[in-house]
Amino acid sequence: MRQTDSVVPPSPTVTGCRWVQLRGASDPRGRISFVETGTDLDLPIRRAYWIHGVPVGKGRGHHAHRESRLILMALSGATGLVLDDGQHRETVRLDRPDLGMIIDAWVWHELHDFAAGTVVLVLASTGYAESDYIRDYADFLRDVKTRDRDDPFS
Ligand code: TYD
């Protein structure tokens, strides 16, 4: 059995976003990928959900979180992922089951251009709470600046 060693793309310029190569192994039976908190991830995982059955032309996301941190990976298929920290916006392609995108809190994200049959797994650091969502982009742009001012470490 050999460890898989795919190339990791450069992380986006958007603050709080980075690719993480998921550990895995490959042998004649196929490939396996895995992730463990503490070893591979510095975020605790409290919740998992997966996005599937997205009709062609439809998008998901269009929000930011106040607290929740996420890792997204395309288990099957592919989608565009828009990332926006209020200053920089970049679109990346999620299309590898062995590569995750970590998205910190206070990053606006949108998923567009789903290929048919795409399944995106999301691991989240918090449980679901609607109060954690910012669903209006104008509110996000206003609050992300206020949040920066309130953060003594920024
Ligand atoms: P939503 O966050 O709008 O989906 P997306 O991020 O793909 O745009 O969630 C859609 C619905 O599902 C909404 O009614 C909330 C509910 N939901 C939960 O109850 N728990 C969860 O963990 C998630 C992600 C969504």
Image: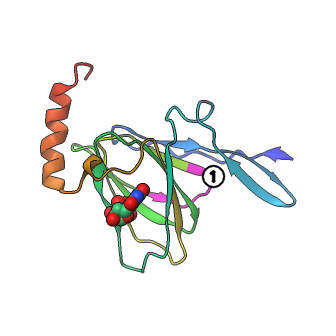
Residue 86 location (% of width, % of height): 22, 44
Per the image, the residue denoted by label 1 is: 98
**Does 106 sit above or below residue 133?**
above
Residue type for callout 1: Asp
Q: Residues within 10 Å of mark 1 (few under 14, many from 20)?
A: many
Query: Total number of numbered labels?
Result: 1
Most extreme residue toward the top, as rendered? 152
Callout 1 secondary element: loop
Which residue shows up at 20% across the image and 30% down it? 148
Query: Is 107 included in the stretch rendered in magenta?
Result: no
**Does 154 sit above or below residue 43?**
above
Query: Which portion, as a residue range, is magenta?
Result: 93-99
Q: Quadrant of ligand 1?
A: bottom left
Which residue shows up at 38% across the image and 51% down it? 128
Query: Is 96 included in the stretch rendered in magenta?
Result: yes
In-front residue for pair 95/62: 62
